[in-house]
Amino acid sequence: MSKVFFSTWRGEAINNSKVDVEKWEESAYNLPQQYNEHSSSKAFIGWDGVALFQEDVDVVRLATEYAAQYQVYSEACGRCAPGRWGGRILYDLLDKIARGEGDRADMDHLKEVGRNMQLTSKCEIGKTVPTPLLDLMEHFEDAFIDCIDNKKASKDYQADINYIAKITAPCTDACPAHVDIPGYIEGVRDLRFDDSLRATRQTMPLAHVCGRVCPHPCEDECRRTNLDSPISIMELKRLGADYETDHGFGFFHPAEKKPDNGKKVAIVGAGPAGLTTAYYLALDGVQCDVYEELAVLGGEVAVGVPEYRMPVDKYNQDIQSVKDLGVNFIVNTKVTADMLRQFEKDYDAIMLGFGTRLSKKVRCGNERPEVQGYWGAIDFLDKVNLYEKYGYKVDEETQKQQMLPTDFVDLTGKIVACVGGGFTSMDVVRCSIRAGAKKVIMIYRRDEKTIIRNTTYEEYHEAVEEGVEFIFHSAVNEMKDENDVLKSLDIDKFELVPDPNGGRPQLVKIEGATFNQEVDYLIPAVSQAANLDLLPEEWELEMTSWATLLTNGTDYMTSRKGVFATGDCEYGPMTIVNAVGQAKRAASVMTRYLQTGEITLSDDEIMEDHLRKMKVYDKKEKVTGWLPGLLRQESEKLDVDVRKDNNKEVNLGFTQEEALSEADRCMRCYYIAMVAM
């Protein structure tokens, strides 16, 4: 909440012009009154109104500067006359008034042009830019008339005031990597898949991956949802990447690689966080050495995400785009504390981007790792995917421990139970189906709705189609074995009991409902932990309560100067797009740190954080001016009988016709936000 002098933001009607400062009314929104730890804001202006934090804001210049930001955008767009020419008129007339050369007819013209833009512009940025300008002209008309009648410049016209603007969109704001989603969709619509991919790679280098296995939180905040159904944002993303790969082009990088600046960074882990850090540091001319414990690159996406979801040849293309920038990879190298001590001497900074590869226990009775048939999810998926993707055979020790008749994971005729409710558990059960298991069960404490929210609708329903049985509101009470060979599970059933005080319903065990389920394998996939043995004790790195590396969540430097952390080791198991978003931010911070020795955020990053707190998407908004009922395109999926006994990619992606039809549904919801300092 922010105390404001004046606000029209999202329909607010706050005017404290005749009220003592101590009694000013607060805005209902998280407006950026405090820009950063060093500076406060004078005003915020954006697509849904304006807020003034001080009485003495020069509203005429504020309006002029906002119109100037839009003029820059509209000149580059030019897709409709109201947006392009209207933007020029808004700026020209406002600047004319601000410098003391306007007349009263200009005010009438401004209002007329603004209202016409709201009604006739093709995209949201053209429709919304006039909104705060019209608010200012209505509520502060005297300030405009004073400049006009007295032929004088607005009071701060020549003042040294910093105006910081950012273009965003609801979907972009919801994306942890802040991908320019309308931009890459526009590339698809224009059949410029190279432009589409460049727009993606501005903040997301792993376009093949995040076009296939992203949980797409952006779609939850797509304005099209308020009209009919969200754009298929994730599937449109893969088109540019597939175009680059399938046609054998060179890499469509978002910018030219800068010359080597003499700085060196060590990166621990070659998963999404490490790859992303290396990509953007390399673009900035930083030499990167990436150390990876496994024999292959890609982290858990490579050895954890199955081939039927993420074909390795596609992922390798993403990895190759990082190599193309000169990044050096060292595989089969488990980093130790002594190595990190040496890294601190040899490199200018260190990025810790290793994963969480220790499977946590179910915490049931008789849970013992030595029991044959008890198999941690990470190791299980490692063995499946290293064989299926790279041809690495299962070692003899694992064959013996897990009673495998072959040098690959063959579960023919077996009953498999997995405990979990996220992507890892979903990968386990669907891989088990493909490994020949006769029955596969998912045991989950919550309900169907929650498991869909934790993963995706598509992932859950594809698993159901393939024959996975889900036992909801349940938990394993005890493992039953004979001579250290797993035989069955005692499973408790629960029910949701409403809280009489109106709080969250509680899961309560149903007495007498416990049942026994015969199984050959129990695979815990409840969560994972990081192995922190590699950290030098004397570094005394601060930790979270979840036993991960503590950063402030904005610049990603740990408690030791020059040592950064992103991804799973910083936050715990997270989605790929979250890891990429953290690493992109960290790479930007590291680039400045390497040059100055200081930790700073760019204005663009500060604005990202402010806008996310404010929430760009308004789920209560009534969207008008667009034709509703345009069906969301559904890409072709392999038929269940064709896919469930092999690792062929399930989602075949859009045809060109489907892609164009889906891209045409995008309303191009760009907005401009600006802070006056």
Image: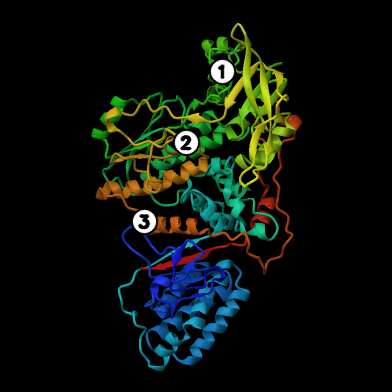
- Image position, residue 370 (x, y; %): 53, 12
Q: Which residue is depicted at the point 63% across and 25% down?
A: 418
Q: Earlier in the sequence, mark 2 or mark 1?
A: 1
**Looking at the image, do the residues carrying marks 3 and 2 touch, with CB atoms under 8 Å apart?**
no
Q: Label 3's element?
A: loop
- Is residue 311 positioned above or below 581 on the image? above
- Image position, residue 184 (x, y; %): 55, 54
Residue 572 tag number = 2
Q: Earlier in the sequence, mark 3 or mark 2?
A: 2
Q: Furthest residue to the bottom?
A: 149
Q: Which residue is mark 3?
A: 602
Front of the two marks 2 and 1: 1
Residue 376 tag number = none
Front of the two marks 3 and 1: 1
Number of other residues with Cα within 10 Å of mark 2, as a class: few under 14, some 14 to 19, many 20 or more: many
Tell me if residue 652 can be seen: no
Q: Label 1's element?
A: loop
The amino acid sitting under disc 3 is Ser
Q: Which residue is mark 1?
A: 367
Mark pair 3, 2: CA separation:
26 Å
- Is residue 123 positioned above or below 261 on the image? below
- Image position, residue 160 (x, y; %): 30, 73
Q: Which residue is depicted at the point 61% across and 56% down?
A: 222
Number of other residues with Cα within 10 Å of mark 1, as a class: few under 14, some 14 to 19, many 20 or more: some
Q: Label 2's element?
A: loop
The amino acid sitting under disc 1 is Glu
Quadrant of the snapshot with the C terminus: bottom left
